[in-house]
């Protein structure tokens, strides 16, 4: 069995859903298809939640009407039955009623937010399932709440793989005579059956979890680009398609800025040695990017990725000198506020680290100031050069820093990973630096068959 995941842009309208159907139909294997909310819908629900928080109930209702119109128009263009449109209307009315109730109660807990956020996927999968039934005899919708089991972190839940494997196995045994299974991404449930979600971008992760627990032959992730690129083509010139990556390279790319994959996606696939292929829904004949365990043996930079909106926290204290336990105290504070740290540099009396999640920044800084002097640098960015073996390949670091002479680099991370060399610099220098690095390392690639020029 293969798992196929289609993102929001892949199911954004009727024409896209028809294209998805054709792609699925052209695969002879048994298929487990995971779909996202239609493009823009989750963003509207996030806006809806923010309006509810600010007591702007009329704005929330306006957003619900936009969601209604988007899905009804899609259903009409797909020529779905009136009974299906009625079910969509009922679902959207349910969303409106929940919003009204929450506005009266003045309650917007993580549990309630998870319930609201799930509506995008629920509406999308209902529409797609009904269209698939028109062309497939043996297609089965399996609610992802019956499949993926999590803890009680409602809006960023952690998967319980043991319970998930049991749940998925039970559902597949019960419905073993179907050729296509269809489910939502992003949405799950806890042991009490309450709706949870896996965080933004969690549809990729949902697909990877399912692939892992069923031992899939392959995980195909369909998006709106031809695969993973050597950098972001929206900002950088002359990017190329990377045809093959190792798990380690793909994981670093996802974490440090590549938008095609959710950072969690690769982990379940690594554990079960499942190939991951990133493909373009709108150009399905393109080879895409294949991610596998084995390495290419080519020790070169394969991508220059970046992340904006980074904050540096400088922590200075003489208590570090000749003592132990100080670092653990620092990281206990970040753990307390569930804030991941990206890059760390230390000296005898100071620690510099970067974060991009600043929602708890004030609380973190207040606690850090009890044990050290703190200073912040905002509007920073991380640039990462990714490629297997680059840490141990002579000359790469010299070329990297040589091409950036004249640009102020605030932090450096090299050695923590054999596939990653990262720096931190001001956002104002970001795109100039990325283009310089891309030109330096990824202009002459004709001798390597792992790259492909874009059409």
Image: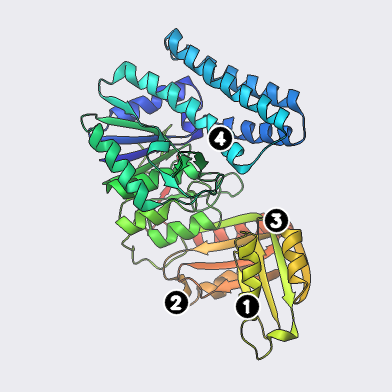
Q: Judging from the image, what secondary structure is the residue with disc 4 in? A: helix
The residue lying toward the viewer, choosing from 438 and 50, is 50
Closest to the camera, between mark 3 and mark 2, is: 3
The picture places residue 321, in percent across and down from the top left corner, at 69, 89
The picture places residue 398, in percent across and down from the top left corner, at 56, 75
Q: Residues within 10 Å of mark 3 (few under 14, many from 20)?
A: few
Furthest residue in direction left, as rendered: 177
Q: Which residue is mark 2?
A: 392
Judging from the image, the colouring scheme is: rainbow
Q: Which residue is mark 4?
A: 115
The residue lying toward the viewer, choosing from 385 and 23, is 23
Residue 369 located left or right of residue 64: right
From this viewpoint, is residue 444 visible? no
First in residue order: circle 3 vs circle 2: 3
Label placed on residue 261: none
Q: Which residue is mark 1?
A: 327
Q: Residue at x 50, y 45 (%)?
A: 198
First in residue order: circle 1 vs circle 2: 1
The picture places residue 429, in percent across and down from the top left corner, at 71, 59
Q: Which residue is mark 3?
A: 358
From this viewpoint, is residue 281 visible? yes
Cα distance in 3D space between marks 1 and 2: 28 Å
Cα distance in 3D space between marks 3 and 2: 34 Å
């Amino acid at each position: 069995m293969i798992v196929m995941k289609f993102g929001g842009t892949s199911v954004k309208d009727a024409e896209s859903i028809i294209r998805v159907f054709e792609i699925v139909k052209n695969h002879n294997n048994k298929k487990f298809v995971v779909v996202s909310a239609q493009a823009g819908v989750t963003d509207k629900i996030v806006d809806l939640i923010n309006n509810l928080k600010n007591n702007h109930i009329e704005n929330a209702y306006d957003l619900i009407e936009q969601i209604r119109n988007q899905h009804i128009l899609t259903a009409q263009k797909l020529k779905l039955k009136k009974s299906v449109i009625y079910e969509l209307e009922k679902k959207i009315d349910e969303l409106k009623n929940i919003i009204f109730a929450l506005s009266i109660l003045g309650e917007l807990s993580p549990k309630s937010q998870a319930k609201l956020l799930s509506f995008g996927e629920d509406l999308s999968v209902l529409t797609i399932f009904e269209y698939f039934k028109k062309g497939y005899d043996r297609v089965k919708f399996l609610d992802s709440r019956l499949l993926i089991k999590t803890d009680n972190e409602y809006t960023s839940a952690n998967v319980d793989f043991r319970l998930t494997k049991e749940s998925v196995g039970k559902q597949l045994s019960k419905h073993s005579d179907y050729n296509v299974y269809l489910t939502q991404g992003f949405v799950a449930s806890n042991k009490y059956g309450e709706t949870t979600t896996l965080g933004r971008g969690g549809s990729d992760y949902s697909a990877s979890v399912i692939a892992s627990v069923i031992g899939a032959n392959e995980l195909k992730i369909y998006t709106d680009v031809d695969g993973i690129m050597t950098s972001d083509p929206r900002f950088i010139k002359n990017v190329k398609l990377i045809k093959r990556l190792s798990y380690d390279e793909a994981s670093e790319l996802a974490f440090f800025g590549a938008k095609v994959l959710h950072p969690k996606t690769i982990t379940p696939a690594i554990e079960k040695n499942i190939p991951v292929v990133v493909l373009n829904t709108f150009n399905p004949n393109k080879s895409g990017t294949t991610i596998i365990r084995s390495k290419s043996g080519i020790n070169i930079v394969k991508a220059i990725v970046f992340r904006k909106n980074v904050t540096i926290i400088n922590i200075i204290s003489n208590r570090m000198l000749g003592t132990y336990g100080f670092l653990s105290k620092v990281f206990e504070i970040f753990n307390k506020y569930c804030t991941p740290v990206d890059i760390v540099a230390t000296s005898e009396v100071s620690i510099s680290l970067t974060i991009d999640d600043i929602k708890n920044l004030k609380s973190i800084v207040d606690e850090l100031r009890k044990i050290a002097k703190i200073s912040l640098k905002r509007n920073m960015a991380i640039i990462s050069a990714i490629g297997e073996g680059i840490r141990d390949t002579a000359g790469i670091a010299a070329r990297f820093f040589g091409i950036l002479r004249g640009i102020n680099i605030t932090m450096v991370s090299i050695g923590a990973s054999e596939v990653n060399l990262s720096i931190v610099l001001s956002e104002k220098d970001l795109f100039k630096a990325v283009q310089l690095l891309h030109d330096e390392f990824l202009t002459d690639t004709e001798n390597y068959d792992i790259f492909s020029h874009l059409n």
